[in-house]
Amino acid sequence: MVQLSPQEIYDASIAKGNSPKLAEMFAMRTAPAAETDTTWLAGRGGLRQQFDNDDRYVGMVAERQSEMGHQVHENDVYLPTLAQYPGDPRAFVSSVGEAKKYAEEVGVGLTVGSRELVKHREPEEDPFETAPKLCPQIAHEEAVKLQQADPKLDIHEATARAIDTHGSDF
């Protein structure tokens, strides 16, 4: 009986029209590894490892999350790609299911190994069109400064100038 090398088995399987993944399984004589929470989270480490074993920083993060009504666990993993803002409590996950649920809510793509669990979804409306050009409080503070420099200036005109000067041009 002739013993074929893994490469020969792979090449023969590809020649028969099998997919590269199936050919690899035949060649390696093993099923693909199961993608579980453990394998998905492996290598990411808990919060302590993610934050370079800085206990003070982990404590600060846990305290802030507690103030927001979220309990952070040592084995949680922070996925910044899920976060809608820095420290988003829903970006602290302990399982693939939890990450998948939140990714679907916000429309962020999520892959586990080579499998795409959640496809990225474009926003329904352009966030830049609905965002304010300048925070109203900052606009008012700047308008007051402009009025102090030029007392003849109307508050509405001063506010418009402040927004034009300091606001974002989306």
Image (cartoon, grey):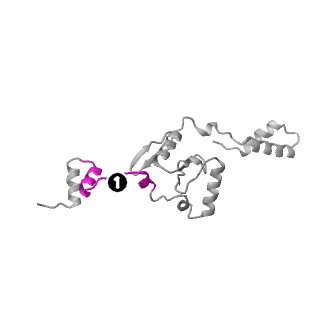
Q: Quadrant of the N terminus?
A: bottom left
124 left or right, relative to 147: left
| Magenta-colored span | 18-41
Q: Which residue is mark 1?
A: 33
Q: Nearer the viewer, residue 89 or 107?
A: 89
Residue 158 in percent (x, y) is at: 80, 40
Give the residue drawn at x 42%, y 49%.
Answer: 112
Where on the picture, by quarter, is residue 118?
top left
Give the farthest residue toward the left. Answer: 1
**Magenta stretch holds residue 25:** yes
Q: Nearer the viewer, residue 91 or 110?
A: 91
Give the residue drawn at x 46%, y 55%.
Answer: 41
46 left or right, relative to 11: right
Residue 28 in percent (x, y) is at: 26, 58
Residue 48 in percent (x, y) is at: 55, 61
Q: Amino acid at mark 1?
A: Ala
140 left or right, relative to 77: right
Q: Quadrant of the C terminus?
A: top right
119 left or right, relative to 167: left
Residue 164 in the image: above or below residue 58: above
Give the farthest residue toward the bottom. Answer: 53
